[in-house]
Image (cartoon, rainbow, N blue to C red):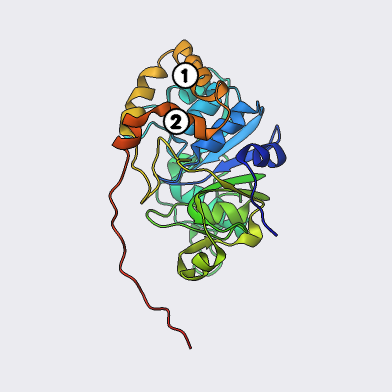
Amino acid sequence: MSKLCSLKEAVAEYVSDGDLVYAAGFTHLIPFAVGHEIIRQGRRDLTLARATPDLIYDQMVAAGCARKIIFSYLGNPGVGSLRIVRSAIEAGELEWEEYSHYSMITRLSAGASGLPFMPMNLTAAPDLEKVNPNFRRVTDPFTGKEVMVVPPINPDVAVVHVQRADKFGNAQIWGILGEQKEAAFAAKKVILTAEEIVEETVIRSDPNRTLIPGFIVDAVCHVPYCAHPSYTQGYYDRDNTFYLQWDEISKTTEGVLQWLQEYVYDLQDHAQYWQKLGEETHQRLKVKEKLSSPINYGEF
């Protein structure tokens, strides 16, 4: 059965006040369009989890969507702090938990596997365990050495953006791989957004690229340019100019609220957002074609 629906419908159906929402994607494929739709629909008291919050959670916190944030590394990549999130944490307005990248991934992996934890070497964890009681030490029964563990995480909703998917939710990703697979398998519900919706035969023609199987996906949404201002490998580039602009916008509450009004609340959907960015931005973010070499899977 087809799982195609609009992004508006998917958020209305699967994201509720109080949910733990995990927006996946590392460096690229960050699902900004979903964050904007959640803002537009006025969700509240969310726990927002991400390995790197990026601007998407700065915007959602500014819009009043979040009660708590769970993260590893907090910042505007290459620029500085996430001003809104940092200010809210320092003011005691936002609950928070901090992890290393690896410990966040082990939480997802344990959640996806139905395990109580996955062990880690101590490495940098001794610093984090001083401020986060979820870091615990246990004894390896085979060597007697201490290892570090953190609890699993099972999001109410995982949001995953991909390059292409079929209408059943079988989805393919290339370029930098983040925690999309782990987040999707750990979550109770999965909203999938895609640059392209293709025929099932296209997905089947290159099965090794399929990271997300349709049977764990609840909604499939065709959302071109979903990841702006981050990027989607092979479709459009990272908007570094916007990351610099956001550092200025987020210096004042008035600047943030004005941006949210103009680029989120006043627009019906992400298609309008992309059009509002203008032709200069569209041209600046275009990428040239660079095809991979074909492979032969063989037919018998």
| Residue positioned 43% across, 22% down in the render | 83
Instruction: Name the disc covering residue 72, or none.
Output: none
Q: Count the marks: how many? A: 2
The answer to whether residue 114 is visible is: no
Which amino acid type is shown beneath numbered disc 2?
Gln
| Residue positioned 32% across, 42% down in the render | 286
Instruction: From the viewer's side, name the closer residue of 21 and 139.
Output: 21
Image location (x, y in percent) of residue 150: 56, 49
CB within 8 Å, label 1 to label 2: no
Image location (x, y in percent) of residue 146: 50, 57
Q: Which residue is mark 2?
A: 275
Left or right, 85 with reference to 238: right
Q: Which residue is mark 1?
A: 259
Q: Secondary structure at mark 2?
A: helix
Left or right, 113 with reference to 127: right
Image location (x, y in percent) of residue 252: 43, 12
